[in-house]
Image (cartoon, rainbow, N blue to C red):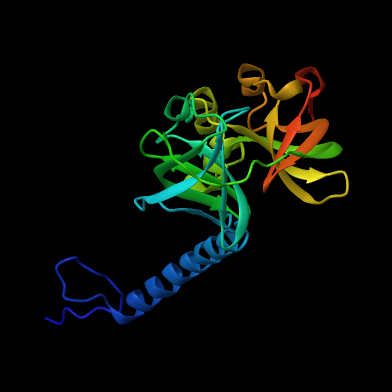
Amino acid sequence: MNHRSDHDFYIGYQPEAPPRLASAVRWQVGALLAPALLAVLLAAWNQESPAPSVYEYGTSLTLRGRLHEHPFPHLVTVDGAGVRTWLLGAEYKHGADGLVAGLDGQEVEFTASRIHRGEHGMLELHQPARAITGHTPHLQPEVMGPRTITGEIVDSKCWMGAMNPGEGPTHRLCALRCLRGGLPPMITGVDAEGQPVAALLTGPGGVRMDSVLWSFTAARVRVTGPVRRIGTLLLLETDPASIERVDR
C-alpha cells in the first residue's frame, strides 16, 4: 500500500519539516520580526544621548583647598588648570555638613572621589576634612546681576554624574531623597538668551530653603534672582514665593 501524500503534514518527532511548510514558516517569522527589529532601531535612534558626566567611583584622591561651609559646603582648589570650585557631598545620598563642620574659611585636606559634568564638579568625601597649612586664595564672589533661568531643580550630586540620567521625572524620587539628605540643590536650564546654565540655588541672603524646593523637584520651573560667581560655581538667590511652574 502506498502511504505517500501530497499534503504537507509535520509531526514533532520527524527529523525535519516538509520543505513547503518550512519555507512558509521562515517567511512568516521574517515578516513578523522585521517590523519588530525596525521599531527597536527607531526607538534606539530617538533616545537622547547620555549626559557627558563622569563619576570616578572607587577612585580616591587626596585633595586640598580652601573650604567654605555656606551656603553649602564647597572647596576652592588651585592647580595647573587654574582655580576651580567644587561642591561637597558625603557618600550615598548625604550632604557633607557633618564632615566639614567648624572648618569654614580654612585650608583643608581630605580623600574624595570626583564627580564632574563639564565645568561643574562635586567631591564625594570619604572621611572628615582636616585643617592644614596652605595658600589657596580667598575668592571674592563676583556679582553678576539678576538672571532668569527656566529649567529643572535637581540634586547636584546625581546631575553631575552620580546617576545618568540624573534629571527628569523618572529621577524625581531619587532627587528628593538626595535633597532631603542635605545635598545641594541646583537649577539647570537656559537663561533669557537661551544659553545653558546651571547654578546652586538658595533663598535670599544664601539661606537654605530645602523643604520649599521638594515640591518643585523635577518640575519645569522659572526662577529669577541675583547671581554671584564663586570661581567656577554660579549661585542664584531667589525668593521661594517667586518660583513659577511652567509648561514643558
Snapshot quadrant of residue 110: top left
Given residues 137 and 4, the one toward you in this image is 137
Q: Is 33 left, or right, of 7 in this rendering?
A: right
Given residues 122 and 104, the one toward you in this image is 104
Q: Is residue 195 visible?
A: yes
Quadrant of the frame with the N terminus: bottom left
Query: Which residue corresponds to the image point at 74% horizontal and 43% vertical from the top-left?
Result: 189
Q: Is 66 left, or right, of 248 in this rendering?
A: left
Snapshot quadrant of residue 146: top right
Q: Is 4 left, or right, of 171 in this rendering?
A: left
Quadrant of the frame with the C terminus: top right
113 is higher (above) or lower (below) than 48: above
In percent of width and height, residue 178 lies at 50, 30
Snapshot quadrant of residue 201: top right
Count of number-bearing discs: 0
Query: Which residue corresponds to the image point at 36% horizontal and 39% vertical from the top-left?
Result: 126
Q: Is 181 left, or right, of 46 in this rendering?
A: left
In percent of width and height, residue 91 lies at 40, 36
Query: Which residue corresponds to the image point at 64% horizontal and 41% vertical from the top-left?
Result: 138
Question: Looking at this rendering, what residue extends furthest in the left direction?
Answer: 1
In percent of width and height, residue 127 lies at 36, 36
94 is higher (above) or lower (below) than 42: above
101 is higher (above) or lower (below) than 134: above
In percent of width and height, residue 13 lies at 14, 68
Given residues 50 and 93, the one toward you in this image is 93
